[in-house]
């Protein structure tokens, strides 16, 4: 007979999760994860457990994983060593925001929200079966108690439970307000742990879709691949429709691209979104081969003209872990790059060089993902499914869920379908052309060992060629590789590396490269949002120059919503990017 600790009994475990598809807990005082480990361990041992366990933990900062492991092994009961080690292995960097950790083949998820707990509780996008309040809540300021109770009630499902592990079983402390006291007085006590069933607001978003889960993704670029892969990991069957595949694909001959974080002095929404996307990309794609996804780091060099920013001051003010971002002087920057650089900048160890074709092919090689060359014109709702039509009105595919991730064409498809309001944000999306240039690595002393950026960028060599770029073609009707674009890119390279390419005549040589489009929205924030109220049709567009940075996050936002999981992003950011 399994023994259930008091907090677990107060949650109603094990009977409340018996044979359910998912069970979700929010712990507002996560600490070092003892409750999570206890619940996870109990879930593993219970044959009647829910198919999925989602746990959300709030804490102000993340500690060192090695110290955490030592403490947990000392304080956790025997038999939990495996869970402890897995938690420590997945432990994220101490960065503000939401971090998603996954275990047991995605059957157990841990969403860690780092920041001021009462503020983070208000920014969670989750519907929970239970919220565990801090044992020390009675010592909080009155206003914060109100905030915690209000936010906890909002995230609870109907008949969800509020639970508080009191420091003693002597009753409700006087410092709690009348509403809280009444709440707990009406609840139940389990060995000093109070619980109370709350009649929360009705659930409005779709969760825990049952039956055969099938989706169509329109678009096979970075965004479409990110969505398809995230859905396939959760057991969905995905059909991708893209204008061309194989030798005619959009990224054919696109040698390499960069996934790099960004910083702003005030850590604004774009910087936070970049951070979340980069961390998600490492978690989601880190298993890919180096050919597709190679963490090589990046240097963002200080500018000497234009919009000059004191990068050292920016990094110092943000107080970031060095494993995320560190300011380095020219000497250290040169050692990192393997080339002599004339100035320092920010070192981002987690930046990645991606080879687009290999990357997309590896993501879409799953048995539940198939690709088809087809040009989509519009969508039509028929009963419970969406029909995907070509220009002749022929049905290409149909599915209950459709995600349009077709870059600039997303606007045309939704507009032709009569699904885009006159004032829709997507109507302001525009195409911005650009080209990159391939330089022989011998021309720049073998090329850098990491991404070097500033005004333009240079990537480590692939097959003897370094990618440098990128030009911006405003108002262009078509894009292709040009000598003018090559000269512009080499001028940027000279400015970054002091390589004298233009002076030495490389700009007058016949060089190769690649040209493409960026789909850009006002404010340079993407659109990742449901188009209809039932959340059966989605748009993922406007990723601009950060398609790699944002596409894994976009995929998990869509897939997590469709699967009823806590979302891996704060609601104030979601509110900005969910406007279509």
Image (cartoon, grey):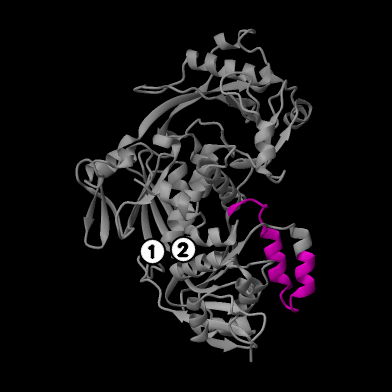
Q: Give the range drawn in magenta.
A: 69-97
Can you give x and y, in whole percent of width and height, for residue 239 in the image? 38, 53
Q: Residue at x 52, y 45 (%)?
A: 273
Farthest-out residue, left:
393
Residue 213's label in the rendered image is 1
Measured in 3D between alpha carbons, the distance from the residue under mark 2 to the one under mark 1, in whole angstroms, is 7 Å
Q: In which quarter of the image is the N terminus?
A: bottom right
Towards the viewer: 218 or 563: 563
Going by the image, does 177 lie left or right of 301?
A: left
Can you give x and y, in whole percent of width and height, for residue 527 in the image? 40, 44
| Mark 2 closeness class: few <14, some 14–19, many ≥20 residues within 10 Å | few
Q: Is residue 41 above or below residue 56?
A: below
| Mark 1 closeness class: few <14, some 14–19, many ≥20 residues within 10 Å | some
Q: Which residue is drawn at 37% across and 60% down?
A: 214
Give the labeled residue for mark 2. Answer: 235
Q: Do the residues labelled 2 and 1 touch (CB within 8 Å)?
A: yes
Can you give x and y, in whole percent of width and height, for residue 537 in the image? 32, 54
Q: Is residue 348 visible?
A: no
Q: In this view, does 301 lie above or below 16?
A: above
Residue 38, quarter of picture: bottom right
Q: Can residue 558 be seen in this view?
A: yes
Can you give x and y, in whole percent of width and height, for residue 135 in the image? 63, 75
Q: Residue at x 77, y 71 (%)?
A: 73
Going by the image, does 176 lie left or right of 461?
A: left
Between discs 2 and 1, the one toward the N terminus = 1
Going by the image, does 304 lie left or right of 402?
A: right
Residue 205, quarter of picture: bottom left
| Mark 2 residue element | loop
Instruction: Assess whether residue 549 is covered by the magenta stretch.
Output: no
Going by the image, does 61 lie left or right of 124?
A: right
């Amino acid at each position: 007979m399994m023994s259930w600790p008091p907090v677990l009994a107060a949650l109603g475990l094990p009977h409340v999760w018996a044979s359910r598809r998912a069970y979700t807990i929010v712990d507002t005082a996560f600490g070092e994860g003892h409750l999570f480990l206890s619940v996870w361990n109990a879930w593993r041992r219970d044959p009647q457990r829910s198919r999925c366990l989602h746990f959300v933990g709030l804490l102000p900062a993340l500690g060192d994983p090695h110290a955490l492991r030592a403490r947990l092994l000392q304080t956790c009961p025997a038999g939990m060593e495996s869970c402890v080690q897995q938690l420590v292995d997945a432990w994220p960097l101490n960065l503000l925001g939401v971090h998603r950790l996954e275990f047991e083949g995605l059957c157990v998820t841990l969403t860690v929200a780092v920041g001021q707990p009462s503020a983070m509780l208000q920014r969670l996008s989750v519907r929970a079966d239970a919220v565990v309040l801090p044992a020390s809540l009675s010592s909080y300021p009155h206003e914060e108690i109100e905030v915690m109770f209000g936010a906890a009630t909002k995230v609870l499902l109907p008949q969800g439970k509020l639970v508080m592990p009191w420091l003693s079983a002597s009753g409700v402390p006087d410092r709690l307000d009348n509403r809280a006291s009444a709440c707990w007085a009406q609840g139940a006590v389990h060995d000093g742990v109070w619980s109370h069933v709350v009649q929360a607001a009705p659930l409005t978003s779709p969760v825990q879709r049952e039956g055969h889960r099938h989706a169509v993704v329109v678009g096979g670029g970075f965004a479409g691949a990110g969505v398809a892969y995230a859905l396939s990991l959760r057991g969905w069957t995905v059909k991708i429709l893209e204008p061309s595949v194989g030798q005619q694909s959009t990224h054919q001959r696109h040698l390499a691209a960069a996934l790099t974080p960004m910083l702003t002095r005030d850590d604004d929404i774009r910087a936070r979104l970049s951070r979340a996307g980069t961390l998600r990309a490492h978690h989601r794609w880190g298993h890919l081969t180096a050919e597709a996804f190679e963490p090589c780091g990046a240097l963002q060099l200080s500018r000497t003209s234009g919009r000059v920013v004191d990068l050292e001051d920016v990094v110092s003010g943000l107080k970031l872990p060095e494993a995320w971002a560190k300011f380095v002087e020219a000497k250290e920057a040169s050692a990192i790059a393997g080339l002599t650089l004339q100035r320092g900048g920010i070192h981002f160890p987690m930046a990645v060089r991606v080879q687009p074709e290999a990357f997309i092919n590896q993501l879409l090689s799953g048995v539940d993902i198939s690709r088809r060359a087809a040009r989509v014109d519009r969508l039509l709702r028929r009963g419970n499914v969406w029909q995907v039509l070509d220009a002749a009105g022929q049905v290409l595919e149909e599915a209950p869920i459709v995600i349009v991730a077709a870059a600039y064409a997303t606007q045309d498809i939704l507009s032709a379908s009569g699904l885009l309001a006159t004032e829709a944000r997507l109507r302001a999306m525009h195409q911005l052309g650009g080209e990159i240039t391939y330089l022989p690595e011998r021309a720049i002393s073998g090329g850098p060992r990491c991404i070097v950026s500033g005004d333009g960028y240079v990537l480590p060599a692939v097959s003897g060629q370094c990618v440098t770029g990128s030009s911006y073609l405003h108002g262009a009707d078509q894009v292709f590789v040009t000598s003018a674009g090559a000269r512009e890119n080499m001028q940027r390279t000279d400015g970054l590396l002091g390589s004298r390419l233009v002076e030495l005549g490389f700009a007058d040589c016949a060089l190769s490269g690649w040209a493409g489009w960026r789909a850009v929205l006002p404010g340079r924030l993407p659109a990742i949002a449901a188009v209809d109220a039932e959340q059966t049709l989605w748009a993922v567009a406007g990723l601009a120059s950060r398609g790699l940075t944002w596409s894994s996050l976009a995929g998990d936002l869509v897939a997590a919503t469709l699967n009823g999981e806590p979302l891996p992003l704060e609601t104030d950011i979601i509110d900005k990017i969910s406007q279509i």
